[in-house]
Image (cartoon, rainbow, N blue to C red):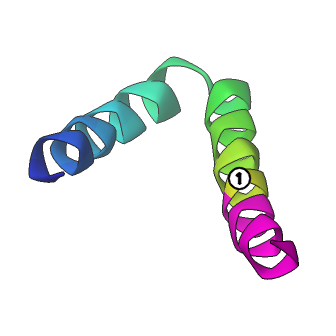
Amino acid sequence: MDTLFDLLKALEPVLLGTTGDMSVRFTGVSTDTRTVQPGNVFIA
């Protein structure tokens, strides 16, 4: 888990510096997944 978090943290600045669009898209996907995850669990 720590490794994944580190990788994400390291990728965050890289993505931000590389392309803002990608960063926004990644953030949107992350939020979407987070919203869907609890929603699915709640429905289940």
Residue at the location (64% across, 50% down)? 30
> In which quadrant is the C terminus drawn?
bottom right
Left-right relation of 39 to 13: right
Residue 7 against residue 14 in the figure, above or below: below
Corner quadrant of residue 11: top left
- In reply to whether residue 16 is colored magenta, the answer given is no
Element assignment for label 1: helix
Q: Nearer the viewer, residue 31 or 10?
A: 31
Tally the numbered discs: 1
Q: Which residue lies furthest to the right in this view?
A: 43
Left-right relation of 19 to 36: left
Residue at the location (73% across, 28% down)? 21
Instruction: Tell me where residue 15 appears, x and y as whole percent.
Output: 47, 27
Q: Which residue lies furthest to the left in this view?
A: 2
Residue 15 against residue 42 in the figure, above or below: above
Q: Nearer the viewer, residue 8 or 21?
A: 8
Q: Which of 5 and 9 is in front in this view?
A: 5
Instruction: Tell me where residue 43 appears, x and y as whole percent.
Output: 87, 75
Instruction: Tell me where residue 34 appears, x and y as whole percent.
Output: 67, 63
Which residue in the protein does label 1 denote?
33
Q: Residues within 10 Å of mark 1 (few under 14, many from 20)?
A: few
Residue 1 against residue 4 in the figure, above or below: below
Amino acid under disc 1: Thr
In the image, which residues are magenta? 34-44
Residue at the location (49% across, 18% down)? 18
Residue at the location (79% across, 61% down)? 36
